[in-house]
Amino acid sequence: MTAHARLWGTLPSRYADRRVATSTVDAAGRIVAFLVAPDARCWVRGPAPDPYTATIVVLDGKDVTEVAVPDLDLQFPKVDVLGDGFVLADARCRMPEGPAPESVAELEAQIPRNARVIGADGSTRGTFHAGDGIEYLTTDAAGDIWIGYFDEASVCVPLPERPPRSRGRAEPARPFRTMLDRPGLIRWTGDGTAAWLAAYDGNGPRSGWLDCYSLNVGATRTWACPYTGFPLVEIDGAGVRCVRRNPIHWAFAVLVAGDRLAFATYDDGEVTMRFGRVTDGPIEATTSEPLHLPGSAPRAVAARDDRMWMAVGSSWHVVTI
């Protein structure tokens, strides 16, 4: 098996005076770029920056759509298309500290609403709490939002359901939400409801979800390789379908085409494609080869089914297996 990168699209030169704060490729294959002024402090830790206006540019072949979004204070932005609009998130947010809140209202007042649903006209339709430590934000064709977290993450989420107690024993009062460290991966609905949580799925990997190291959101399935064991976890609308042992570690992206797999890793400053196949049990590694990209290493990656897009400079390149 071989893989070659080809040019997918390039941001028009008229945006050269803007900074690409973040970028992705949506479920329809469109390039989505979040552009800000060069002096926007959206990648600096510390107090929130002064409100700024961002321009979301969507490239669909030769068609270019611009949406101005005013009054933003996101410091580590993530973006993807959601319906006829967009979802934005601040990857780092300050979680509540100090004594535990004594009421649901107090807790709801403390947690930051660091995700924002934006309409096609740039107006805000709603906000929700997406948690701290976001590594990936990817929407699917059904309108759900998959957020993968790294190992410093925490999020305030609903408590898992408990089985009913025996008759005669009252259930103690419980708060609506709880702080969850290292959530790994969460599927949110378009209105910001946590519909599935990796940490609550008993069919997940035994090593847990310390870090969602790679994520592939396909048309009907989602795949992830969580740290520390890097198994390939297959997920559908009901939850984890399968966990396969994987001899290929530290892959920042995974591509899936039936029983054929490809994993992208960094080796000595270069991208290497490591191929494998699915047998009746674990993944079997087969061959590997370097992936030649123009310019520097990719600054953003998006994987969907058998394709992986990588942003290099102002251009996106695609690899298909």
Image: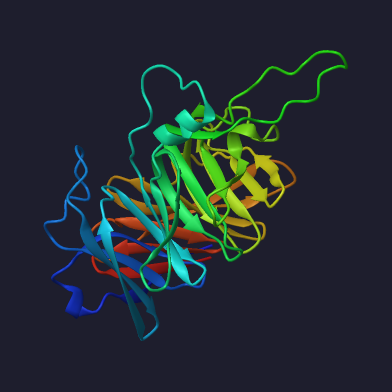
186 lies left or right of 273: right
The total number of labels drawn is: 0
Q: In the picture provided, is 54 more to the left or to the right than 238?
A: left
Instruction: Give coordinates of residue 113: x percent, y percent.
Output: 40, 44
Looking at the image, is 3 positioned above or below residue 178? Answer: below
Note whether 255 is above or below 47 in the view shown.
below
Residue depicted at 40% across the width and 83% down the height:
61
Q: Is residue 3 visible?
A: no
- Whether residue 116 is situated above or below residue 114 in the rendered picture: below
Whether residue 245 is visible: yes
Q: Which is more toward the observer, 125 or 37?
A: 125
Q: Residue at x 36, y 86 (%)?
A: 62
Image coords of residue 161 (percent x, y) = 70, 30
Work out which quarter of the rendered image holds the N terminus and state it: bottom right
Q: Quadrant of residue 57?
A: bottom left
Left or right side of 306 for 160: right
Q: Residue at x 41, y 50 (%)?
A: 115
